[in-house]
Amino acid sequence: MSNINRHGLPRNIPSKVKVAVRQNSRFGCVICRSAIYTYEHIDPPFVDAKSHDPSKMALLCPTCHTLVTKGRIPKEHVSEKYSSIQNSSFVKRPSDQEFFIHYGKELSVSLGSSEFKEFRSIINIDGVDVLSYQKSSETDAYSVSGIFYDQLGKELFRIVNNEWIGPIDVWDVEQVGCRLTIKSSPQRVLFEAIKDNNKSELSIIKLDMYFPPFHVFIDSGRFLVGQYGEDINESAYFEIDGTFSHGDCALYLDSKRSSQLKPSEVRMVGGKGAWVEGTGIWIGYGSGQMQLRRIQFFNNRCKIGARNVIKKSIEPRADQNYFVVGSLDVRVIDHPLWIEQEYFINGQKLTSKPFSWGKIDEPHGKSIELFHISRSEPEDLAINPGFIGFYADDILSKEWSDRVFEVEVEECGEDGNYTRRVKRADVGNRRIINAFNPGTGKPFHPQEFAGTCPWKEAK
Ligand SMILES: [Zn+2]
């Protein structure tokens, strides 16, 4: 195919003309409204055209273009449609089945430089999904749905059963290859995303979305989430950069949770992601793994401080568990998305209910308990005021240990072979038999006799 026609007109269409054709066609094929399109000279056709004149061109999808070329759709009909779309206030919105569909096995969505792998909901505000990928239980296919909003809180576009339905009343919507861009003015980008089907990735690289009281802003690799107060001049912004995987919701915004706009700390809670205290902003809700690289706070759009909130972490070995004394506080939380119980030990939040080893009677009628907490709690429990250690030895050396549990070792078996059995008794004033496990040469690990069965064989 020649790059110029017989009048010397280059095939390349100047970008200014392309914008005009997109605007005139209201961002979709003028016949069927598909958002996958090419720029076509209608009358005269490109071979006879002397200029790229937007008034003589239109957007056509590949199917409609073929039908026009074969004469099955008359050119007059295309011109008629093109002018009626420009003059009517009731125009069907452009749509396509492709852009948000996900084909791969493991879906990864980036919001700025933060990456979310295998999240069911990408953004959810007060229980409403802005973008979500539901995996079918029968096939491995994902079903995409959602609604995005613009900088004023008005609907920008929606995705219904995998079908993207774009806007008609913005300045520009452009789909080139695997990039989708929506602008409210030549300079202001409201949404821009790139997808890579080979890598199973969708990257939202620009977003300017307001959903009172929240503002989500993504630009130049930065991912900012803001919350406004009743006085619109008061705001708090939170910027995050991290990698999260296998969770419920990448960005969860809960307007009922917000009480004040003075974020003091980011709480990182195992399975619950990172929560900015004092706001309703959650990142990586339910994530199995989370790696935070950077967090910053801004107040009223001014930078008020940047600090590394990731505390020194002591990682227990695979066979170890945390042992913490203190009081357990169980709170019932009525989320729009989840109704759940939250567990706090000495004010520190846990992912799951800790296992009690019994009560310790302290002076002044105060009652404390000893808790065995799974090592899968990523929260750094080693800095909890009640933390006593990882080993059985740590517990056995405590002065109250004989008030909490008892260990008995008995020998049985035949022909000189013996099995050691370890028993965990009820709370009581009993003595501990400081028995050594012949296998390890160390005192029995409480984990070796934890569980529902009071008798457990220790190897
Ligand atoms: Zn079409």
Image (cartoon, rainbow, N blue to C red):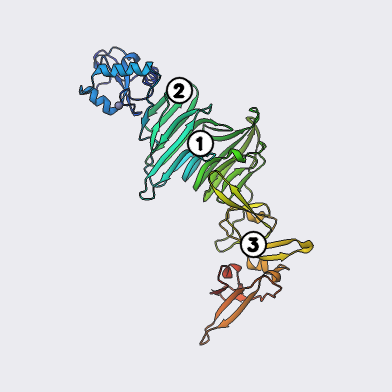
Q: Is residue 163 above or below residue 452?
A: above
Tell me the SS state at disc 2. loop
Label 3: how many residues lie within 10 Å, few (<14), some (14-19) or many (20+)? Answer: many
> Residue 189's x, y, as percent?
48, 26
Please tell me which residue lies in front, 301 or 441: 301
Image position of 252 (left or right of 9): right
Tell which circle, 2 or 3, labels the residue nearer the N-terminal end: 2
The image quadrant that residue 295 belongs to is top right
Left-right relation of 342 to 34: right
Q: Which mark, residue 51? A: none
Q: Amino acid at mark 1?
A: Gly
Look at mark 3 in the image and give the residue it sits on: 371
Q: Position of residue 36 (x, y in %)?
A: 34, 29
**Element marked by disc 1:** loop
The mark found on residue 170 in the picture is: 2
Which residue is tagged 1? 112
Residue 4 seen: no
Q: For disc 1, does the CB lie below 8 Å from ligand 1?
A: no
**Closer to us: 320 or 80:** 80
In space, the residues marked 3 and 1 are separated at their CA atoms by 40 Å
- Residue at the far right: name it: 364
Question: Disc 3 vs disc 1: which is toward the camera?
Answer: 3
Q: Amino acid at mark 2?
A: Val
